[in-house]
Every structure is written in structure tokens, then in C-alpha cells.
Amino acid sequence: MKSKRSRTYLVSGLTLALIFVAIILVFRDVMPDIVKDLSTVPFWGVLLLLALGFAYEAMESVLCLVIIHHKKPDCTFIDALRVTFLGVFGNIATLGAGTLPMQSFYLYRRGLDAGSGLGIMASEYVLHKISVLIYATVALLLGSDWLEQSASGLARYLLIGYVIGALIVIALTLLYTWDKVLKLVLMLLGKLPHTPKWDERREKWANSLTELNREAKKVLLVPSIRVKGIAVRLVKLFVLYSIPYAALRLVGCTALNFAQAQMLASLMLLITSALPNVAGVGPMEFAFLLLFAPWADTAIASSALVLYRVATYFFPFLLSVIVFLREEKKSLKGFDGQSA
């Protein structure tokens, strides 16, 4: 048990170290300018960004609570907050592999069976994708003329990101709610090579998809949960999309108004959902600079990106480490008690 815990700490530390090294390598040419810009950010500005970052995660917990209440009415907002931060920790420290297991285990300790926990988390993810698509669609309808006039060269990237994002949303929604799509996917899995290794993988994937489909339908096909879930998600996205505007203002960029920054941020998240990432790093940085750099020089856009990632990535991860350590300590006490 101690060796497992040590491995977790080691992986967490190495992940953060690699991320810092990657950031330094990417921004090495403008690093002096970034340091200069960041040194001008007032302390209240940093607190504002951290508050927005926490509010963003708190809204995620509100959605989690809405879904959990359908299964277990006695769960509290604190429970949902812990589930959220365990997800943050799992996504970064285990490169995504431990996200669902950590969240599901916590929900299991709160009285929900493993299948229900996985279904809740899968449903939350689908509602997130749907909300991102809705927000980006509305933003484009309202601001497409301004975007076309100001940065017509971005249209190709945005169209590709929008189409791929929409396809992902549609595919996930159908996979988790329509049995015919699940049968099609299982049939395609049957086309994989028939060897002992692939047979084992196929059986594992098929069982997981079937269980997720069964449990997610219990959530996604409930109209009240869909409506409340998407409404909460849209508010959460509004908070998230306000952070780039605040970050840009704090480093001196005034070329974008609040509505324009909101639209670009919504398209940024849509693009990142269409690109592969490791521990949430890579696509976000690329999309941020792609969309915001045309209205600010590279150094200012990079400085705003650093502030954005501190608020939405590093600060939540720091909080998630605290939550993980507390929950792990409780789990170890329970394990030791059973062993005794």
C-alpha cells in the first residue's frame, strides 16, 4: 500500500515537472517578456483569477450534485466537490487513466455501486460536450460577422474544430443512449484480430461500453436532469470563458471586449476537444495562442495564457492534491480497520 502511494506521489511530481519543462521550452524565446508582463499583474488580479478558477470547478460540482441526487438524495455539495477534484487529480496525475476509477470509488464509499458511479461520470462528460457545442454555436451565430472581418484566416481551423467537436458530441450521445449504435460498435469490435490478447481486450471494452450505456441512459434519458445539467454547464462555461478576458486585461491587452473574448474562448474549447492531449496539456496552449494572438503580440498572449493555465489547471490541481491526500488517508484507515 505504501509503495502504491509513493508511486502516485512520484507520478504526480514528475507530471508537474514535465509540464513546467514543456512550458519553459515552448516560451523560452519570449520568457523575459512574459516575466515582465506577469510582474505588473496586481495581487487582486491574481486573487480574481484564482476565484474564477475555483468557481469554475465549483460549478462542475453543482452539475455532479444534480446528477448524483437522482441516485442518492443524501449526497451533499461537499461530496460533489470531492468527486470533482478527485477527477482533476486523476486526469493530471495518472494521465487520465485514474479519473473514473477514483471518482467511482469515492461514490462507492458513499453508497453508490460502481456501475452507477461510472454512469454518472459518463453522463456528466456527455452533458459537457453538448453544452460546449451549444455555447460555441450561439457564439458563432452572434459574432460570426465580426470574426470573419477581423480574422478570416481562422475560419478554416474553426470549421474543422466545430465539425469534429459536433461529431464527437453526436457519437457519444448516441453511444450512451441508443442501443442500435452500441450494437454497431460491438460489431466493429468483433472485427478486431482473434487472438488471446485481443479477445481479452475486446471482452473488457465490450463489457465497459455495455455497462456505461446501461447506466448513462438512466441519467441522460431523464428530461429534468438533461435540462438542469445543460443549464448548469452553460453557466460554468460562462465562468470559464470569462477567465481569458480577465487574463488579457491584466497583462494590458484591450483589443477585445468581453463578448468577443467569450466567443473566442468558446471556440478555443471546441477546438481542444477535437485534439489529442496528455494530462490536459498541449491542445489548450495551441488553441489559446491561435485564437488570441491575432489581437495581442506573442508575449502578451503568452503571458495571458500562463495566467489562464494557473487559474484553470495548476491551482485546481493543487487543490485536488489536498483532496486526494485526505481521501486516501480515510481509505487507508478503513483498510487498516478491516485488516485488524
Image: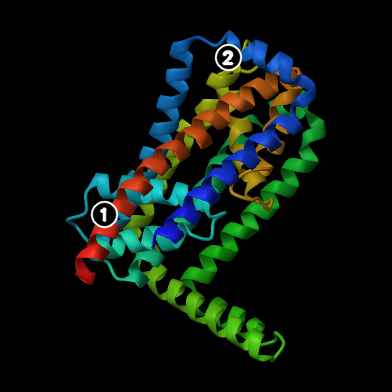
Callout 1 secondary element = helix
Q: What residue is rendered at 52% in x and 47% in y?
A: 12
Q: Position of residue 65 (x, y in %)?
A: 29, 50
Q: Position of residue 229 (x, y in %)?
A: 38, 50
Task: Judge whether residue 254 can be spotted in this image.
Answer: no
The image quadrant where one finds the C terminus is: bottom left
Q: Amino acid at mark 2?
A: Arg
Rendered position, 126 above or below 254:
below
Callout 2 secondary element = helix
Q: What residue is rendered at 54% in x and 43% in y?
A: 13
Rendered position, 241 above or below 157:
above
Rendered position, 89 above or below 59:
below
70 vs 223, nearest the viewer:
70
Would you call the spot at circle 2 few (<14 residues within 10 Å), some (14-19), or many (20 or more)? some
Would you call the spot at circle 1 few (<14 residues within 10 Å), some (14-19), or many (20 or more)? few
On the image, numbered disc 2 is attached to which residue? Answer: 249
On the image, numbered disc 1 is attached to which residue? Answer: 330
Q: Position of residue 167 (x, y in %)?
A: 64, 59
Q: What scheme was used to colour the molecule?
A: rainbow
Q: Residue furthest right?
A: 153
* Distance in Å between CA atoms under marks 1 and 2: 43 Å
Rendered position, 159 above or below 112:
above
Q: Position of residue 305 (x, y in %)?
A: 63, 27
Task: Judge whether residue 282 can be spotted in this image.
Answer: yes
Q: What residue is rendered at 73% in x and 24% in y?
A: 293
Mark closest to the chain's N terminus, 1 or 2: 2
Disc marking residue 296: none
The image quadrant where one finds the N terminus is: bottom left
Q: What residue is rendered at 69% in x and 24% in y?
A: 302
Q: Residue furthest left?
A: 74
Q: Amino acid at mark 1?
A: Lys
